[in-house]
Amino acid sequence: GGVSNGFEDEVGNPSGFADTMQLIDSASTRNNLNGVQLIFQEEIMYWRGWTIDGIVKTGLYNNSITGTVSERYIGTDPITGESSTYGRTFFDRKTSLAFAVSVGLKSSFPLSDHWSLLSGYEMTFLDGVALAPEQYGAISGTTFVNRRYDINDNGQIIAHGANVGLQFA
C-alpha cells in the first residue's frame, strides 16, 4: 500500500526508519520428452498359474525445456506503509538429451478362469531434466543489471512406486 517512493534508508523515509525489504522469487520449468524406449521383460517365476516377471526399460529422449525465474523486491516503510516494488523475470528455452532407465517386477496371480490379480513395483531414474529448485543457481552475472539466465538441464529424478489391479480376460 501507499505511494511508491523507491527504496529508502532512515534518512529518506518520512518516518525516519529504514525500509523493510522483502525478496519474493519463484521458478518453473517444463520438460517435454520425445524419444525411443526399449523394454525387456523376462519371466522369473511360474507356479500354478502365478507369474512374476522382471522388467527393464531404457530410453533416450529429446527434451524440449522452458524455464522461468522471477524475482520481486518490495521495500516498505514500517511506519507509514508506503512501499515500492521492483521485479524482473528471466526466461530461457533449450533442447537437450535426456536418459531414463527403469527396473521393476510384475506379478499376475489367477483368481479364477477369467480374473487375475496384478501387482508390481517399479523404480525409474531420469537424467537430463530441468528442475525448478535448481534454476536459481542458473542466473549468472557480476552486477544486478548484467545478469542472465541459462536454464540448468542437469537435473536427476528417482521415482518409484507400486501398483495393484484386477484383470479380466
Image: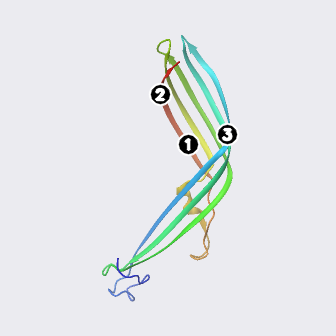
Q: Position of residue 143 (x, y in %)?
A: 59, 76
Residue 161, placed above or below residue 2 = above
Instruction: Work out which quarter of the rendered image holds the N terminus and state it.
Output: bottom left
Q: Residues within 10 Å of mark 2 (few under 14, many from 20)?
A: few
Secondary structure category for the residue under label 1: strand
**Residue at mark 2:** 164
Q: Is residue 60 left or right of residue 67?
A: right
Residue at x 64%, y 34% (from the top left corner): 57
Residue type for callout 3: Gly
Would you name the residue on which mark 3 appears? Answer: 59
Distance from the alpha carbon under mark 2 to that under mark 1: 21 Å
Q: Residue furthest left?
A: 79
Query: Which three-letter amino acid code belongs to the residue tagged 1?
Result: Ile
Q: CA distance from mark 1 to mark 3?
A: 15 Å
Q: Is residue 153 visible?
A: no
Compare marks 2 and 3 and give the one earlier in the sequence.
Answer: 3
Q: Report the residue marked by disc 1.
A: 158
Q: Nearer the viewer, mark 1 or mark 3?
A: 3
Classify 10 Å Cα crowding around label 1: few (below 14), some (14-19), many (20 and above).
few
Q: Secondary structure at mark 2?
A: strand
